[in-house]
Image (tube, rainbow, N blue to C red):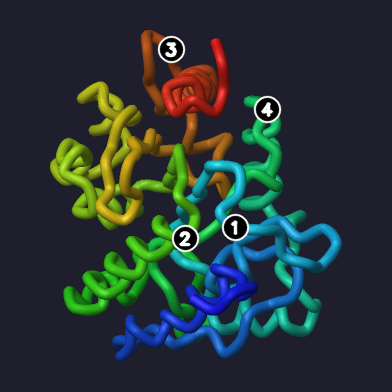
Amino acid sequence: MRYGRHPVERLFELLGTVEPYPEGVVPVPEKLPGTAFFPGGTGLWQPDGAPPPMPIGGVMVLGHDFYSEAGYRRFVAERGESTRGPTWRNLLALLARVGVGPERCFFTNAYVGLRAGSRNTGRFPGSRDPGFVERCREFLGEQLRAQKPRLVLTLGSYVPAVLAPLSGDLAPWLRAASLKALDEAGRPLIPNARFPSVPGGEVAVAALVHPSIRWASVLGRRYAGLEGDAAEVAMLEEALRVSGLREG
C-alpha cells in the first residue's frame, strides 16, 4: 500500500473483486460525500467532511446492504446520506446509551452494490447467487483487515449467516435462522471469535435487531433473564466489556 493512502480507498479499489454483479444488483457509481455506510460512502463518521484515520475506535457496525438505486440517486441529489433517517437515528441513539460515539465506528455492509430499482426492504437480491455471496464474504474479510475491530455489531436477522463462515467460533450462528433462535440458544453474543484477517486478537461479535424498526423488533429479545430493550442493551454492554472497549 502506498504511503499516505487511506485504507478505505483500498477497499473501494477492491470492490472490483466482487464482480460480476448478479441480476437485481448494480454497483455503486461513486462514493457519497460526508457520512454514509460503506460502500455508499467511506463508512466513517465525517462531521467536517474529511475521513478520519483507519482503523479507528475498535468497532465495526455491519449492516445488510446499502440501499436501492432510487435511494442512492436521492442521496446524490441531497449531497449525502441523511443521518436523520430511522436507521441512523435509532442506531446512534442506541450507541449513545452505552457510551459509544460514532467516531469510534466503521459503518459498513455485508453485501456490496445497490438493489436495482426502488425497493429497499427484504432479502438482498444478490443473496440468491452463491458465487456473489462468497465474493462478498471474501471482501468482508478485507474490511475486517482494514478496521481490525475488537467488536463487531451485526444489524438484523440476515447478516449473522453471512459473517459466520469467516470464523469457526461463529459456528452456532450458522445453525440459527433468526435472532430469536440465537437468543434461545444463548448465543447472540460470541465473546471471542477469531478471524484470519484479524490476526493476533479475538473479536467480540454481537447480533442486534435492525435499527430501522428497532422499537418494534427489539420486543422479542431475550438475554441474561431480561426481555426486550433491556435485554439487547445488556448484551451490548457485555459485548463492550468482553471486547476490552469498556472497563468494569
Identify the residue under disc 1: 54
N-term-proximal mark, 2 vs 3: 2
Residue 176 sits in which quadrant? top left
Q: Position of residue 238 (x, y in %)?
A: 46, 20
| Nearer to us: label 2 or label 3 | 2
Tell me, yes or no, whether the two marked residues, 1 and 2, touch with CB atoms within 8 Å: yes
* The one of 88 and 33 positioned closer to us in this rendering: 33
Q: Amino acid at mark 3?
A: Leu
Q: Residue 199 in the image: state x and y as whole percent.
A: 31, 48
For the C terminus, the image quarter is top right
Amino acid type shown at disc 1: Met
Q: Earlier in the sequence, mark 1 or mark 4?
A: 1
Under tag 3, what secondary structure?
Answer: strand
The residues bearing labels 1 and 4 have C-alpha atoms spaced at a distance of 20 Å
Left or right: 74, with 190 as reference point: right
The residue beneath circle 4 is 99
Residue named by callout 2: 146
Q: CA distance from mark 2 to mark 3?
A: 35 Å
Say what secondary structure mark 1 lies in: loop
Element on which disc 2 rests:
helix
Q: CA distance from mark 4 to mark 2?
A: 24 Å
**Left or right of 225: which side holds 36?**
right
Q: Residue at x 38, y 65 (%)?
A: 142
Viewer-nearest of labels 1 and 4?
1
Q: Which comes before the other along the chain, label 1 or label 2?
A: 1
Rendering coords of residue 106 (x, y %): 57, 54
Cβ atoms at labels 4 and 3 below 8 Å apart = no
- Give the mark nearer the N terminus: 4 vs 2: 4
- Residue wearing tag 3: 226
Dot 4 alpha-carbon crowd within 10 angstroms: few under 14, some 14 to 19, many 20 or more: few
